[in-house]
Amino acid sequence: DQQVKQNSPSLSVQEGRISILNCDYTNSMFDYFLWYKKYPAEGPTFLISISSIKDKNEDGRFTVFLNKSAKHLSLHIVPSQPGDSAVYFCAASVAGGTSYGKLTFGQGTILTVHP
Amino acid sequence: GAGVSQTPSNKVTEKGKYVELRCDPISGHTALYWYRQSLGQGPEFLIYFQGTGAADDSGLPNDRFFAVRPEGSVSTLKIQRTERGDSAVYLCASSLTPGTYNTGELFFGEGSRLTVL
Protein backbone atom coordinates (compact mmCIF):
# COMPACT_ATOMS: atom_id res chain seq x y z
CA ASP A 1 0.00 0.00 0.00
CA GLN A 2 1.21 3.46 -0.88
CA GLN A 3 1.43 5.35 2.42
CA VAL A 4 2.59 8.58 0.79
CA LYS A 5 0.93 9.62 -2.45
CA GLN A 6 1.63 12.34 -4.95
CA ASN A 7 -1.32 12.13 -7.28
CA SER A 8 -0.04 14.56 -9.90
CA PRO A 9 2.72 12.95 -11.98
CA SER A 10 3.55 16.30 -13.58
CA LEU A 11 2.98 20.03 -13.28
CA SER A 12 3.73 22.79 -15.77
CA VAL A 13 4.03 26.42 -14.63
CA GLN A 14 5.04 29.73 -16.17
CA GLU A 15 8.12 31.45 -14.81
CA GLY A 16 7.25 33.92 -12.05
CA ARG A 17 3.99 32.19 -11.14
CA ILE A 18 3.30 29.97 -8.15
CA SER A 19 3.93 26.22 -8.23
CA ILE A 20 1.87 24.11 -5.84
CA LEU A 21 2.83 20.48 -5.34
CA ASN A 22 0.56 18.26 -3.29
CA CYS A 23 1.08 15.19 -1.15
CA ASP A 24 -1.26 12.96 0.84
CA TYR A 25 -0.40 10.36 3.47
CA THR A 26 -2.35 7.62 5.18
CA ASN A 27 -0.18 6.60 8.14
CA SER A 28 -1.20 8.66 11.18
CA MET A 29 2.09 7.75 12.89
CA PHE A 30 4.02 10.01 10.51
CA ASP A 31 4.99 13.18 12.28
CA TYR A 32 7.86 14.58 10.23
CA PHE A 33 7.62 15.51 6.58
CA LEU A 34 10.22 16.51 4.02
CA TRP A 35 10.44 17.59 0.41
CA TYR A 36 13.33 16.54 -1.78
CA LYS A 37 14.25 17.77 -5.25
CA LYS A 38 15.92 15.58 -7.84
CA TYR A 39 17.65 16.54 -11.07
CA PRO A 40 18.38 13.88 -13.72
CA ALA A 41 21.40 11.69 -12.94
CA GLU A 42 21.73 13.18 -9.48
CA GLY A 43 20.65 12.01 -6.06
CA PRO A 44 17.72 13.69 -4.30
CA THR A 45 18.60 16.84 -2.37
CA PHE A 46 16.81 18.07 0.71
CA LEU A 47 14.63 21.12 0.20
CA ILE A 48 12.48 21.82 3.24
CA SER A 49 10.85 19.99 6.14
CA ILE A 50 8.08 20.39 8.66
CA SER A 51 7.27 18.84 12.00
CA SER A 52 3.72 17.86 12.82
CA ILE A 53 3.62 20.42 15.63
CA LYS A 54 3.63 23.15 12.96
CA ASP A 55 1.30 23.90 10.10
CA LYS A 56 3.67 26.03 8.05
CA ASN A 57 7.38 26.34 7.42
CA GLU A 58 8.94 28.89 5.13
CA ASP A 59 12.40 29.10 3.60
CA GLY A 60 12.89 31.79 1.00
CA ARG A 61 10.75 31.02 -2.04
CA PHE A 62 9.67 27.67 -0.58
CA THR A 63 6.82 27.16 1.88
CA VAL A 64 5.44 23.85 3.11
CA PHE A 65 1.94 23.66 4.55
CA LEU A 66 0.71 20.77 6.68
CA ASN A 67 -2.94 19.91 7.30
CA LYS A 68 -2.85 17.05 9.80
CA SER A 69 -6.59 16.50 9.94
CA ALA A 70 -6.66 16.01 6.18
CA LYS A 71 -3.31 14.16 6.17
CA HIS A 72 -2.22 16.50 3.41
CA LEU A 73 0.80 18.66 2.78
CA SER A 74 1.75 20.98 -0.01
CA LEU A 75 4.85 22.74 -1.25
CA HIS A 76 4.51 26.27 -2.63
CA ILE A 77 7.25 27.79 -4.76
CA VAL A 78 6.92 31.52 -5.35
CA PRO A 79 8.06 32.84 -7.73
CA SER A 80 8.85 29.78 -9.83
CA GLN A 81 12.08 29.82 -11.82
CA PRO A 82 13.23 27.64 -14.75
CA GLY A 83 15.97 26.22 -12.50
CA ASP A 84 13.24 24.78 -10.27
CA SER A 85 12.38 22.29 -13.02
CA ALA A 86 13.02 18.90 -11.44
CA VAL A 87 11.27 15.94 -9.84
CA TYR A 88 9.91 16.75 -6.39
CA PHE A 89 9.44 14.00 -3.82
CA CYS A 90 7.38 14.22 -0.69
CA ALA A 91 8.63 12.04 2.17
CA ALA A 92 7.44 11.19 5.66
CA SER A 93 8.89 9.61 8.76
CA VAL A 94 8.22 8.87 12.39
CA ALA A 95 10.45 11.33 14.22
CA GLY A 96 12.58 10.37 17.15
CA GLY A 97 15.26 7.85 17.89
CA THR A 98 16.59 5.91 14.97
CA SER A 99 13.59 6.45 12.72
CA TYR A 100 14.53 9.85 11.34
CA GLY A 101 16.22 8.58 8.23
CA LYS A 102 13.72 5.84 7.45
CA LEU A 103 11.71 7.83 4.98
CA THR A 104 8.63 6.79 3.05
CA PHE A 105 8.60 8.59 -0.29
CA GLY A 106 5.83 9.47 -2.68
CA GLN A 107 6.10 8.68 -6.39
CA GLY A 108 7.28 12.16 -7.29
CA THR A 109 5.93 15.07 -9.34
CA ILE A 110 7.80 16.37 -12.37
CA LEU A 111 7.76 20.16 -12.28
CA THR A 112 8.48 22.09 -15.46
CA VAL A 113 8.83 25.84 -15.25
CA HIS A 114 8.61 27.54 -18.64
CA PRO A 115 10.49 30.79 -19.30
CA GLY B 1 34.80 15.21 -2.68
CA ALA B 2 32.66 16.21 0.25
CA GLY B 3 29.52 14.38 -0.80
CA VAL B 4 28.32 10.78 -0.70
CA SER B 5 30.18 8.75 -3.27
CA GLN B 6 28.75 5.64 -4.93
CA THR B 7 30.45 3.17 -7.25
CA PRO B 8 29.89 1.95 -9.84
CA SER B 9 27.59 4.55 -11.35
CA ASN B 10 26.33 1.95 -13.81
CA LYS B 11 26.38 -1.82 -13.63
CA VAL B 12 25.02 -4.22 -16.25
CA THR B 13 24.95 -7.86 -15.28
CA GLU B 14 23.31 -11.10 -16.31
CA LYS B 15 20.54 -12.83 -14.44
CA GLY B 16 21.94 -15.07 -11.73
CA LYS B 17 25.17 -13.15 -11.21
CA TYR B 18 26.47 -11.60 -7.97
CA VAL B 19 26.75 -7.83 -7.64
CA GLU B 20 28.39 -5.48 -5.13
CA LEU B 21 27.58 -1.77 -4.87
CA ARG B 22 29.75 0.51 -2.79
CA CYS B 23 28.95 3.65 -0.80
CA ASP B 24 31.37 6.10 0.79
CA PRO B 25 29.42 8.43 3.10
CA ILE B 26 30.17 11.98 4.11
CA SER B 27 33.00 12.08 6.64
CA GLY B 28 31.66 12.23 10.17
CA HIS B 29 28.21 10.88 9.32
CA THR B 30 27.54 7.89 11.50
CA ALA B 31 24.19 7.00 9.97
CA LEU B 32 24.08 5.35 6.53
CA TYR B 33 21.06 4.29 4.51
CA TRP B 34 20.41 2.30 1.36
CA TYR B 35 17.35 3.02 -0.76
CA ARG B 36 16.19 1.58 -4.07
CA GLN B 37 14.38 3.57 -6.73
CA SER B 38 12.53 1.77 -9.48
CA LEU B 39 11.44 3.53 -12.64
CA GLY B 40 8.62 5.99 -12.03
CA GLN B 41 8.66 5.46 -8.27
CA GLY B 42 10.09 7.22 -5.26
CA PRO B 43 13.02 5.78 -3.33
CA GLU B 44 12.21 2.79 -1.10
CA PHE B 45 14.03 2.17 2.15
CA LEU B 46 16.19 -0.93 2.29
CA ILE B 47 18.50 -0.79 5.32
CA TYR B 48 19.92 1.61 7.90
CA PHE B 49 23.28 1.44 9.65
CA GLN B 50 24.22 3.25 12.82
CA GLY B 51 27.96 2.82 13.03
CA THR B 52 28.89 -0.72 12.07
CA GLY B 53 25.60 -2.37 12.92
CA ALA B 54 22.44 -2.67 10.87
CA ALA B 55 19.90 -0.91 13.07
CA ASP B 56 17.00 -1.60 10.73
CA ASP B 57 17.03 -3.98 7.75
CA SER B 58 13.28 -4.29 7.42
CA GLY B 59 13.30 -2.99 3.84
CA LEU B 60 15.54 -5.69 2.35
CA PRO B 61 13.24 -7.57 -0.07
CA ASN B 62 14.62 -11.07 0.54
CA ASP B 63 17.70 -12.95 1.65
CA ARG B 64 19.46 -12.40 -1.67
CA PHE B 65 20.17 -8.87 -0.44
CA PHE B 66 22.78 -8.18 2.21
CA ALA B 67 24.73 -5.11 3.30
CA VAL B 68 27.78 -4.56 5.47
CA ARG B 69 29.60 -1.64 6.99
CA PRO B 70 32.54 -3.29 8.75
CA GLU B 71 34.42 -0.18 9.92
CA GLY B 72 31.52 2.20 10.32
CA SER B 73 32.29 4.18 7.19
CA VAL B 74 32.16 2.59 3.72
CA SER B 75 29.22 0.26 3.09
CA THR B 76 28.70 -2.44 0.49
CA LEU B 77 25.31 -3.66 -0.72
CA LYS B 78 25.53 -7.23 -1.98
CA ILE B 79 22.97 -8.88 -4.24
CA GLN B 80 23.19 -12.60 -4.93
CA ARG B 81 21.59 -14.48 -7.83
CA THR B 82 20.36 -11.26 -9.41
CA GLU B 83 16.95 -11.21 -11.06
CA ARG B 84 15.58 -8.87 -13.74
CA GLY B 85 13.29 -7.33 -11.10
CA ASP B 86 16.36 -6.13 -9.20
CA SER B 87 17.01 -3.57 -11.95
CA ALA B 88 16.79 -0.14 -10.32
CA VAL B 89 18.86 2.78 -9.09
CA TYR B 90 20.36 1.99 -5.70
CA LEU B 91 20.80 5.13 -3.63
CA CYS B 92 22.99 5.53 -0.60
CA ALA B 93 22.51 8.35 1.90
CA SER B 94 24.19 9.44 5.09
CA SER B 95 23.34 11.75 7.96
CA LEU B 96 24.46 12.88 11.37
CA THR B 97 23.41 10.73 14.27
CA PRO B 98 19.63 10.89 14.57
CA GLY B 99 18.38 12.78 17.55
CA THR B 100 21.16 15.31 17.74
CA TYR B 101 21.37 18.07 15.16
CA ASN B 102 19.49 15.99 12.69
CA THR B 103 16.46 17.48 11.04
CA GLY B 104 15.85 14.24 9.24
CA GLU B 105 17.79 15.50 6.27
CA LEU B 106 19.60 12.79 4.36
CA PHE B 107 22.45 13.48 1.97
CA PHE B 108 22.11 11.23 -1.04
CA GLY B 109 24.70 10.01 -3.49
CA GLU B 110 24.07 9.97 -7.24
CA GLY B 111 23.15 6.31 -7.13
CA SER B 112 24.28 3.11 -8.82
CA ARG B 113 22.10 2.11 -11.75
CA LEU B 114 21.82 -1.67 -11.88
CA THR B 115 20.53 -3.38 -15.00
CA VAL B 116 19.98 -7.13 -14.91
CA LEU B 117 19.63 -8.67 -18.37
Image (spheres, coloured by chain):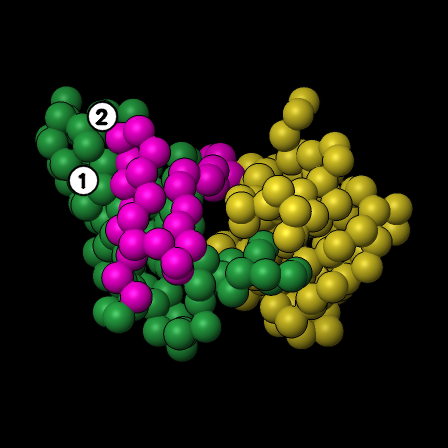
Chain colours: A green, B yellow
x 65%, y 35%: residue: B4
* Labels 1 and 2: the sequence-earlier one: 1
Q: A18 and B65: which one is in front?
A: A18
- Residue B115 is at least partly visible in this image: no
- Lateral position of residue A114 relative to residue B7, left or right: left
| Main SS class of the magenta portion in the image | strand
Residue A57 highlighted magenta (yes or no): yes
Q: Is residue A96 above or below residue B58?
A: above
Which region of the structure is painted magenta?
A41-68
* Residue matched to label 1: A19
Residue B31 lies, in percent from the top left, at 70, 49
In the displayed structure image, the side of residue B93 where residue A28 appears, left or right: left
Q: Which residue is mark 2?
A: A81
Q: Are marks 1 and 2 in contact (CB under 8 Å)?
A: no
Q: Residue at x 53, y 61 (%)?
A: A95
Choose top left, top right, bottom left or bottom right for residue A40. top left
Question: In screen coordinates, is B46 left or right of A40?
Answer: right
The x, y position of residue B72, in whole percent, is 83, 47
**Quarter of the image that includes the C terminus of chain B:** bottom right
Amino acid at circle 2: Gln
Residue at x 44%, y 63% (from the top left corner): A31
Residue A58 appearing in the image: yes
In the displayed structure, would residue B79 be above or below residue B6? below
Residue found at the very far bottom of the displayed protein: A1
Q: Quick one: SS at disc 2?
A: loop
Is the residue marked by circle 1 packed among few (<14), some (14-19), or many (20+) residues within 10 Å? Answer: many
Extreme right residue here? B71
Question: Is residue A10 placed above or below B81 in the rendered structure?
Answer: above
For badge 1, the amino acid type reads: Ser
